[in-house]
Amino acid sequence: MKSHRIGIALLAIALLVAGCGREGGASETESTAGPAVSGNFGDLSGICGPGSAKSASAQGVTASEIEIGMFSDIGFTKNPDFVDAAKVFTSWCNAAGGINGRKIVTNLRDTNFMEVRQRMLESCREDFFLVGGSAALDGLGVKDRLSCLLPEFPAQVTATANTGSDLQLSAGATVAENVDPYSGFHDWLIKDAHPNSAESVGIIVGDSPITKVMSDKFTESLTASGATITYSDLYPAAGVSDWTPYAQSIKARNVRGLIFLGDFRYLAKLQDVLTGMDYRLDWIDANANSYNSTYLDATKSSLAAQNNYVDLSGTTPLDAAAKVPAVQQVRDLFERYAPDSDITFQVLRAFQAWVLFAKSATACGDNLTRACVYDTARKETAWTGGGLQAPVDLSRPLAEQTRCFNVQKATPDGWKTADFAPNNGAFRCGFTPYAYSKDFGKPTTLADVGKTMNDLK
């Protein structure tokens, strides 16, 4: 019984961390046979296609294949989002001719939550690059990754040690050390959308080290923006059978806006209890990992009563498909290669990473090296992933840039764009993220493992 309880707690922690942003071994991503397809994606031309590559130019690269590592906790969480994104993207890219004729082979590095270092050491021995993945305890492998000079374009990162670490480029716009990338969204909530809510904001998070740090960060940035935190609480990582005591505390403190960090299924249960008590908040920040159909199904009884918002942090939403060809293309590709899979926030973030890798690797031609791919990607000064995100300057640290946010609201008819006054297509751009005054730790650098950028080949 004790080991069973520990297992449940570990699973809950993994889901908590995944809500704030996965037995390793190689498994080739399946490809669907069919006629040759275009290698264009969104507004990008020829990011995949045939060619005459001949050299085995780097570890994991032959004249015919490129081995890419993709981290996931799928063996533990059963969350398939990153695996689905890898399958769909590589199936399409390989059908279009691959990377200059080289086929992409995805090595799933299933960290099983606690096996990050083991999978990273395997990846160091075999993979050319890491693309489109995430692991809840990713900080456990960052020093090994830098020691073996393995670059990554992740879908999400979690631990402070890995967030903004060296040899890492995030195709999405939320990865930045020492700043709050959600401060534009939260300012909109407490100053524009629901100004009366600023006098009573609550934060409830799962009891894990990473989410507790995030609570401290939000408390600092919200207080600096003029909000008053009247409720702050932890719930057990494994969840609770009855959310009534938490709902009663929220009501007793007259909380108007609530930030929830953790598994969105837990949030669904909490807000059902709040709705049953006839207590309606002005807003709930459900966090972007709730951007999926499962959350909508779990909250059917309370969606009309509660205002559930998420900030996609510059990721183009699915309801923009009619105006943004890249989003419609993702929909079409999933219909072809993974028709039963959900297109979630994690999927969209992973797709951005895969697009960045494919464009950069194709530009390198036959002489495909880690240094070439990484340096080519860093030259993107207005990267949009073909239309999947707001522009990001990958040549500069994200902490130094003004940013964009975009808000989705959960409704009985699905996720819909909220009325948040966008000023740049689907996004509201121009806010400067709040810089934390407290020391919440630093990302790992090459210097920490005795390396420099000159060592990257």
Image (cartoon, rainbow, N blue to C red):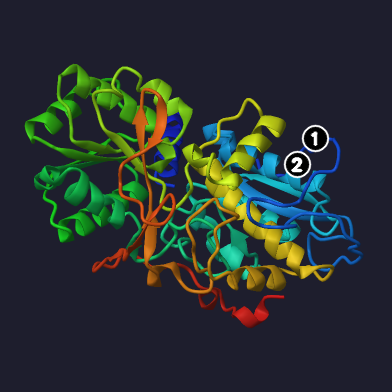
Question: Could you tell me residue 63's position as x and y percent?
Answer: 89, 60
226 relative position to 440: left or right: left
In what element is the residue under mark 1? Answer: loop
Question: Could you tell me residue 318's position as x and y percent?
Answer: 50, 38
The residue depicted at 38 percent of the width and 28 percent of the height is: 265
**Quadrant location, the C terminus:** bottom right
Pointer 2 and pointer 1: residues touching (CB < 8 Å)? yes
Q: Which residue is mark 1?
A: 32
280 relative position to 21: left or right: left
The residue depicted at 26 percent of the width and 32 percent of the height is: 307
Density class for disc 2 (Cα within 10 Å; few <14, some 14-19, many ≥20) is: many
**Closer to the camera, 343 or 210?**
343
Density class for disc 1 (Cα within 10 Å; few <14, some 14-19, many ≥20) is: some
Q: Quadrant of residue 163?
A: bottom left
The residue depicted at 69 percent of the width and 64 percent of the height is: 360
The residue depicted at 60 percent of the width and 29 percent of the height is: 341
Q: Which residue is mark 2?
A: 91
In what element is the residue under mark 2? Answer: helix
**Closer to the camera, 96 or 91?**
96
Amino acid type of the residue that numbered disc 1 sits on in the rendered structure: Thr
Amino acid type of the residue that numbered disc 2 sits on in the rendered structure: Ser
